[in-house]
Amino acid sequence: MATSTPVNVPSKMKAWVYGQYGKPEDVLKLESEVDVPDVNDNQVLIKVVAASLNPVDFKRMYGEFKATDSPPPTVAGYDVAGVVVRVGSKVKEFKVGDEVYGDVHEHALNPKGCGTLAEYTAAEEKVLALKPKNLSFAEAASLPLAVETAYEGLESARLSACESVLVLGGAGGVGTFTIQLSKHVFGASKVAATCSAGKLELLKTLGADLAIDYKSNKYEDLPEKFDVVYDTVGEADRGIKALKEGGRVVTIVGGQSVVPPAFVFVVTSTGSVLTRLKPLIEEKKLKPVMDPKSPFPFSHTIEAFSHLQCGRATGKVVIYPI
Ligand code: NDP
């Protein structure tokens, strides 16, 4: 039961919905008569202003998490930035009118039916944080799942100051944050990262001391070795060959064979990471990186998915305005 008076909340909304598993271009439809979600005691209802896409969105849509997923029909989308329009009776941190952002699915592989590619979405307060004032809604929507994965993944690899890190896939949604956090939060002594030739300069501006063109160099053959390899592309086995004695490979890509000292990490959505990073965002030490084709308007969401699915996006693919 919600305790606050609703602010002009209609009963129906537009949302991108799929009724069966498949490719976005085949199954994802923009529907206009979808029920606005109810909120339970611990949730808030958000008027969505912007959302961002993640590969998990299309992997889930393909049916890769069928065993743990909530069954379709599903409103797609994990990441949101928007305005609170209703609060549940036990919500303590947020009130109507607050500008918030977050990844609404606490467990990435066990998501609920109600996502963020919609005019309204419901989320537990623990997955949300107040939007830093210096970020636009589009910029804020580009952070949650990717920055939380970067942060928690580096924590799980126990990266400490005075250690070096190699980020495989430094130009993607997760990689761009992993470089910035390694440098500015974890205090890594050296940050190296891979990407294709045209993105080398970007990686340096994000904090990489060494940017490696993976098409013309084999990073595992470099004389220099690393304490931590953070794998966002599915190369855990090659990553092991780039480690120093006692090093660790954290990979966020499933479906590959992973042997120690490599291990798989899966993100848990929590607003506490976003809150912890707020000062850094406000000091502009941690910056959103939006793909140059972004933002895509809400009606062009299928096009945005096609772009992300190519695997060549730079930073984050954002949907705005919604
Ligand atoms: P993106 O789609 O944003 O990554 C695209 C980037 O990957 C491009 O910039 C591309 O750069 C780069 N890239 C592709 N192939 C290579 C390569 N061989 N070497 C170096 N760079 C490469 O993906 P995300 O960063 O959002 O996610 C990465 C992976 O992590 C996905 O598989 C995703 O599902 C997974 N993931 C897992 C999570 C978890 O909790 N386990 C959470 C979040 C994501 P270029 O064009 O220069 O090649």
Image (tube, rainbow, N blue to C red):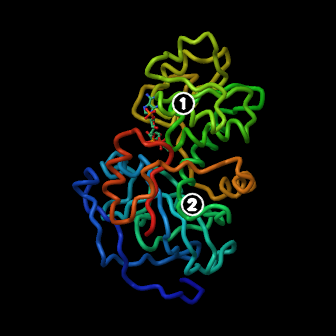
Q: Residues within 10 Å of mark 1 (few under 14, many from 20)?
A: some
Q: Secondary structure at mark 2?
A: strand
Amino acid type at image mark 1: Leu
Q: Residue at x 52, y 73 (%)?
A: 46
Quarter the N terminus occupies: bottom right
Q: Position of residue 310 (x, y in %)?
A: 34, 40
Badge 1 or badge 2: first in the primary sequence: 2
Q: Position of residue 90 (x, y in %)?
A: 64, 77
Q: Residue at x 54, y 30 (%)?
A: 200
Amino acid type at image mark 2: Gly
Q: Residues within 10 Å of mark 2 (few under 14, many from 20)?
A: many
Displayed quadrant of residue 117: bottom left
Q: Residue at x 24, y 57 (%)?
A: 27
Residue 62 shown left or right of residue 316 in the figure = left
| CA distance for labels 1 and 2 | 29 Å
Residue behind mark 1: 200
Displayed quadrant of residue 270: bottom right
Q: Residue 102 — which label?
A: 2
Q: Position of residue 236 (x, y in %)?
A: 49, 25
For the residue pair 237 and 284, the one nearer the viewer reads as: 284
Quarter the C terminus occupies: bottom left
Q: Residue at x 54, y 70 (%)?
A: 82
Q: Position of residue 108 (x, y in %)?
A: 48, 51
Q: In the figure, 123 relative to 64: above or below?
A: below
For the residue pair 289 and 243, the one nearer the viewer reads as: 289
Q: Residue 294 — which label?
A: none
